[in-house]
Image: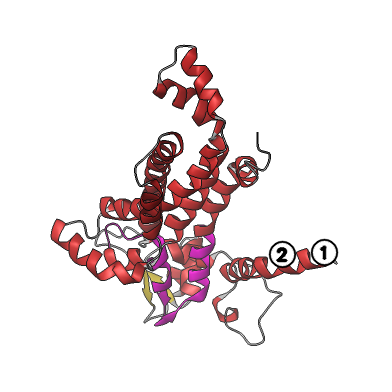
Amino acid sequence: MAVVAVLVITIIFLAPIYWITATAFKPRNLATTIPPTVVFEPEISPFVKLFLRRSQLREQPTAEEYAEAPWWERLVFDGGEKIVRDGQGNVQLSGYPSRFMNSLIVAISSTVLAVGMGTLTAYGFSRFKVAGEQDWLFFILSTRMLPPVVVAIPMFLMYRWFGLNDTHLGLIILYTAFNLSFSVWLMKGFIDEIPKEYEEAALVDGYTRMEAFFKIVLPEAATGIAATAVFCFLIAWNEYAFALIMTRRDAQTAPPFIPSQVGSGLPDWTVIAAGTFLFLIPVAIFTFLLRNHLLRGMSFGAIRK
């Protein structure tokens, strides 16, 4: 019975991923059919259209133009669109590559900062007596209690005043601040489980407090750091509200850009699915690389000293 329950839950969670993946390889005319089309001949035209700027085709290309066009341009022609070129005839890329790169820059930078500062803060709360410790910890946690949309307008006005709207630095600061409380609380639990005797022995051997932290505590807390990094990266990678409100073009990330993809006057669901499919890959790779640390981190502290 437990096996059946696990299988059912797994299917429920994997169904959206399958649906996005299948739609990303469907012809556009099969993306919204009722009943849904399950068996189809996959094609890569959604990915070609995702990376290229295109506009509605007003006149069909001649047979000669169609024959001389490269294969990827013929795929766009077949969809009733044409590729946008500059005055010199060069193909213009869509905004997806730059938005994808923005997501990588902002998510990685904010994750490194949030985990780094969170680890140091958690170590201080775990190892030293801090006046009003519980009050400070509650205050840190309270920064996550408000939904982002509640503070979006004040943050927008403040960012406009400081000139941080539509900048990488602005998003990095914002995501770091919102992930920091989560990082502090999660890392404090991991550091609390590391016996203080390890550090005391190192101090007796002549280590300084910082040397003991870097050589004793950090290696022991590696699983916790990995688990915290995964969750902070996921939060920053998937964030939509602030990226939509605080950015326009230069620092816009992929989540608000993907739904804006249209083709021939209507939303092109195959292109949207292709962008979403590619957007899932870095998260999957990052989680896969840290899978061993993540599994150990979830059970860290189960056996106490």
Please give the residue where the numbered disc 2 appears in the rendered image: 10
* Residue 273 lies in the magenta-colored region: yes
Q: Residue at x 46, y 57 (%)?
A: 235
Across and down, in percent, residue 278 comes to 51, 58
Task: Measuring from the top left, give residue 175's x and y in whole percent.
Answer: 36, 54
How far apart are labels 2 and 1 at the CA level? Answer: 12 Å
**Image spot of residue 251 (x, y percent):** 29, 57
| Disc assigned to residue 249 | none
Q: Verify whether residue 113 appears in magenta.
A: no
Which residue is at 62% across, 41% downward?
300
Q: Residue at x 46, y 38 (%)?
A: 126
Looking at the image, which residue is at 41% across and 76% down? 262
**Which of the pair 57/123 is nearer the observer?**
123
Local packing at callout 2 (Cα closer than 10 Å; few below 14, some 14-19, many 20+) is few
Q: Residues within 10 Å of mark 1 (few under 14, many from 20)?
A: few
- Image side of residue 305 versus residue 228, left or right: right
Which of the image's four quarters has the N terminus?
A: bottom right
Label at residue 2? 1
Identify the amino acid type marked 1. Answer: Ala
Where 231 sits versus 305, above or below? below
Q: Which residue appears farthest toward the bottom when viewing the image?
A: 34
Residue 78: x, y in percent? 50, 74
Give the quadrant of residue 260: bottom left
Residue bounds of the magenta highlight: 249-278
Q: Secondary structure at mark 2?
A: helix
Quick one: which residue is furthest to the right in this view?
A: 1
Query: In this rendering, is residue 48 above or below 200?
Result: below
First reached walking from the N terminus: tag 2 or tag 1: 1
* 134 over 82 or under it: above or below: above
- Frontmost of labels 2 and 1 is 1
